Image: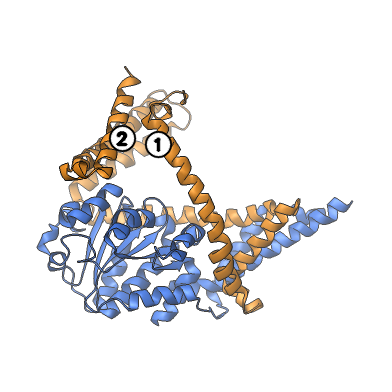
Amino acid sequence: MERLMKIDRRIIYLLGAAIVFLTMLYPLGLPVAISDLARQTYNEVENLPDDAVVILSPMYDSGAMGELNPMFVAFFRHCAERGYKIIIVNTQWVQGPQIVHKFATEIAEEYGYVYGEDWINLGSKPGAAIFLQTAVKDFWEACIEDFNGQPVESYPIMQLVPKVTAEYVDACLVLNCGTPGAPEWLAYVCQPEGIKLIIGEIQMSVPESMPYVNSGQYAGMIAGSRGCAEYEQLIGHPGQALKAQDTMSAIALMVTLFIILGNIGYLATRKK
Amino acid sequence: MRKEGPMIVTVLSSLVVLFSNYFFLGQQWGLTDRLDYWFNISYGIALALGFVNLTIIHWKYVQRRREGWVYSVILLLVMYGYLILGIVQKHTGPTFSWIYDNMMTVLGAAVFSLLAFLISSAAYRAFRIRTKEATILLVCAIFILLARAPIGDAIWSRWSYWGNEWFMGVLNTAGYRGILLGAYVGAFAVALRILLGLERAHLGGTGTQ
């Protein structure tokens, strides 16, 4: 029984790796039930005006891209399907716009979106709160140039948004994984200006964001990989998150079984 | 003056921000706009300072042939090489982007992915029902773990409802709001102590008076 408490960690790692590969090769196809939160988030995006302008902010780097890239794809695809104008910009997370540019370009081509007219990538801007506060007063001055180094005011889409206020922007979709992130968007842009804030959150930080969802400060939230799988089903485009759910299930089950085994060993040895 | 100087700057900056945000006249004068520019400039200077500091430290390591000095050489080569490449090509350049996409991004993702394995092993070792509190923690952890994956629903159809909607929406929100309120009251107290010059940790040394 004592052995159950001292299983070599390499066995756990090996088993984990094997489960990841096997479930990717042979998916179980477990159904993913759609939660009220995912439905609420979907409705918030779906019900924006037809000529809506949205800011899509990938506030993350490569560490979180496994979970947040599928959310970016889902949000971008949903907005493109609805015909919204999409502005990609973030602050401080230097890698974000670089990581998502490839996906954005592919989906934009699929929907016949023209760069500079229907969507734009403004890149990453320094300053965090300072950038956000400046964007509210003068978006062009805050950004200066886009991802390709061209002046922002030279693009037709940017003529629609001289300031990040409710008059020009309908919603901010923020993909969040740390600081600065959605709370900064809320404090400096969305709350003072009355702009709808919808977020995508990594699983680890979902507990932190739930109070904001319940208070209505976040109009919606894609909660982790599971939430993204639900959202992908709602927009009718199953993607990476949905594919990952079988692996998540198998790993969750494995960890649970190891915890139970460890405790059986612990209880048996304690009684002695 | 080494301590008094930064302290005077801190107090003055804080007063300007307070005045600008809480008084109509301050907002009209647009004092924070000017401070925002200064912040951005000092951010850039701090970055350059870090760059120079890193160079000096690792150059010393190389000169003295300290243990692991080869890594310092690699760091300096990569840091300056990538900087020069970025200046020549800009961040949209093909080689610059290729290195970024195929090294930085992939390495970052790989390091983060390793956490999944570490957490699996750590959960197995840490979750023991030693006390009543530990047992509650363990039960909650397993409940949420299975609720966040479709396997929970496969076991019991209401699992994700109770885990994601009730546990997270009611229990977690109530607890987290308490923590947040406490944290913000604490942050306010620290800000006040800094403003009054009682908290000196940011000036270096041991801190409080």
- Residue drawn at x 43%, y 68% is A222
Number of the label disc, if any, that sits on residue B191:
1
Labels 2 & 1 near each other (Cβ < 8 A): yes
Pinpoint residue B101: horizontal percent, then vertical percent.
33, 57
What is the total number of numbered labels drawn onto the structure image?
A: 2
- Residue closer to the observer: A33 or A213: A213
Q: Choose top left, top right, bottom left or bottom right for residue B139.
A: bottom right
Pinpoint residue A63: horizontal percent, then vertical percent.
43, 55
Q: Choose top left, top right, bottom left or bottom right for residue B194.
A: top left
Numbered disc 2: secondary structure: helix
- Residue drawn at x 30%, y 49% is A129
Q: Find chain B in the image and tell me its colour.
A: orange
Would you say A246 lies left or right of A84 here?
Answer: right
Can residue A21 be seen in this snapshot?
A: no
Q: Choose top left, top right, bottom left or bottom right for residue A62.
A: bottom left
What distance separates the C-alpha of mark 2 from that of mark 1? 9 Å
In the depicted structure, whether residue B3 falls above or below residue A92: above
Residue under numbered circle 2:
B14
Mark 1 neighbour class, 10 Å CA radius: few under 14, some 14 to 19, many 20 or more: some
Q: Find chain A in the image and tell me its colour.
A: blue
